Image (cartoon, rainbow, N blue to C red):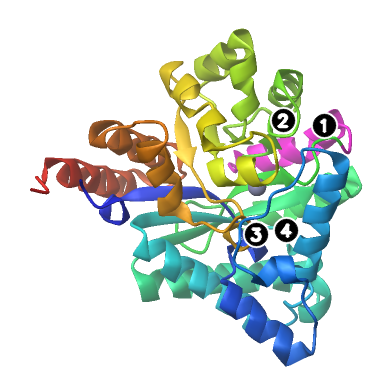
């Protein structure tokens, strides 16, 4: 069997705080005298019910982790370690997602917060041999005008390379907020050339996917897995070329599916969807990028050729330049051509 950590790939769904190593969180918490909930540091994947209560618990844990990130140095460390861990797993392109709002009070505002992440992404790219670009994400829990402010800020740093903003996202509980009210923010982002990469179709089903497609015109959907419940919605995504950032461990942790086998990876791929596997929040879900490819191999029976196709999909769905994509795609070909015996 070929080594999946050597398979070149792009990682398109990883959150800034959620990317943290457990040891790093422990160190930061100790430094600030913060007592962490055991569920954050026991190393076990979370298992929550797919209810508002479950989501509330997830958010509380997430907030506890976020409360340990209080300085520019902390922020730089997180980006650097995310890049290092991704590179070790064969990722040649990371598009890390950050909502700068929570960190702004510690560094003098949302503009410095974004600039610190971008500068750290540039430095980490040079240090670890991976391209780290950034997705700025708004939250459904805040006012849509906040999202517009973030979109305008993100637009100022639009680009495609390391340390540039490549996309605009929308995260948090899909059951909250009115999707249509975020349309304006996404128009600002798209007009600036940013990819539209909102979350959708994870906690809510095909009707939500339909709304997100109509209102936010996504290039990629964060998750989108529940489109598998309605062939028409799924075919529409495929027809529009909307890629899906599928995060199996996250789905199972948040109770969207009972176990890995129920994640409809096969249905999505067989329908022709462009799938990019992602880890979402390794800190909470207990596994990183390669583990998602391993699940495709061991649980869903993808052979090496099909795994190479998943990696190609991730590269094609990224916002990397043509030169970077060609380099990574050539690497995928070489991985598959190499006989492991
Ligand atoms: Zn996510």
Q: Which residue is mark 3?
A: 284
Query: Could you tell which of marks 2 and 3 lies nearer the N-terminus?
Result: 2
Is the Cβ of the residue at disc 1 closer than 8 Å to that at disc 2? yes
Mark 4 to mark 2 CA distance (whole Å): 18 Å
Mark 3 to mark 4 CA distance (whole Å): 18 Å
Query: Could you tell which of marks 4 and 2 lies nearer the N-terminus?
Result: 4
Mark 3 to mark 1 CA distance (whole Å): 26 Å
Q: Main secondary structure of the magenta part?
A: helix
Which secondary structure, mark 2? helix
Question: On residue 131, which mark appears?
Answer: none
Query: Could you tell which of marks 4 and 1 lies nearer the N-terminus?
Result: 4
Which dot, 4 or 2, sits closer to the camera?
4
The x and y percentages for residue 294 are: 38, 45
Q: Which residue is mark 4?
A: 99
The verdict on label 1 being within 8 Å of ligand 1 is no
Mark 1 closeness class: few <14, some 14–19, many ≥20 residues within 10 Å: many
Query: Could you tell which of marks 1 and 2 lies nearer the N-terminus?
Result: 1
Number of numbered discs present? 4
The x and y percentages for residue 168 are: 66, 46
Question: On residue 216, which mark appears?
Answer: 2
Q: Residue at x 83, y 60 (%)?
A: 60
Which sits in the foreground, 9 or 149? 9
The x and y percentages for residue 120 are: 54, 74
Above-or-below relation of 251 to 30: above
Mark 4 to mark 1 CA distance (whole Å): 18 Å
Which dot, 3 or 1, sits closer to the camera?
3
Mark 2 closeness class: few <14, some 14–19, many ≥20 residues within 10 Å: many
The x and y percentages for residue 341 are: 7, 48
């Amino acid at each position: 069997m070929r080594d999946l950590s050597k398979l070149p790939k792009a990682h398109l769904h990883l959150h800034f705080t959620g990317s943290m190593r457990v040891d790093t969180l422990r160190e930061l918490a100790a430094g600030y005298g913060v007592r962490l909930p055991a569920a954050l540091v026991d190393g076990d994947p979370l298992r929550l019910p797919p209810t508002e209560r479950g989501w509330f618990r997830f958010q509380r844990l997430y907030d506890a982790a976020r409360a340990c990130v209080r300085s520019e140095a902390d922020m730089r460390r997180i980006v650097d370690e995310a890049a290092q861990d991704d590179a070790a797993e064969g990722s040649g392109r990371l598009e890390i997602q950050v909502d700068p709002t929570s960190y702004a009070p510690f560094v003098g505002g949302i503009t410095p917060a974004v600039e610190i992440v971008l500068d750290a992404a540039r430095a980490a790219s040079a240090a670890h041999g991976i391209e780290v670009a950034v997705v700025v994400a708004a939250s459904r829990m805040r006012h849509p005008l906040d999202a517009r402010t973030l979109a305008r800020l993100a637009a100022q740093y639009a680009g495609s390379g390391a340390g540039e903003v490549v996309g605009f996202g929308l995260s948090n509980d899909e059951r909250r907020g009115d999707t249509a009210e975020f349309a304006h923010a996404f128009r600002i982002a798209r007009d600036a050339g940013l990819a539209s990469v909102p979350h959708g179709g994870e906690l809510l089903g095909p009707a939500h996917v339909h709304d997100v497609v109509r209102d936010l015109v996504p290039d990629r959907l964060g998750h989108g897995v529940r489109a598998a419940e309605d062939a028409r919605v799924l075919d529409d995504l495929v027809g529009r070329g909307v890629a899906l950032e599928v995060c199996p461990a996250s789905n199972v942790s948040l109770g969207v599916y009972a176990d890995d086998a129920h994640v409809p990876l096969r249905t999505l791929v067989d329908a022709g969807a462009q799938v990019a596997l992602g880890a979402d929040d390794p800190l909470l879900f207990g596994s990183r990028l390669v583990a998602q490819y391993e699940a495709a191999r061991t649980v869903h029976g993808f052979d090496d050729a099909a795994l190479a196709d998943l990696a190609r999909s991730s590269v094609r769905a990224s916002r990397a330049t043509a030169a970077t994509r060609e380099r990574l795609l050539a690497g995928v070909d070489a991985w598959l051509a190499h006989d492991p015996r």
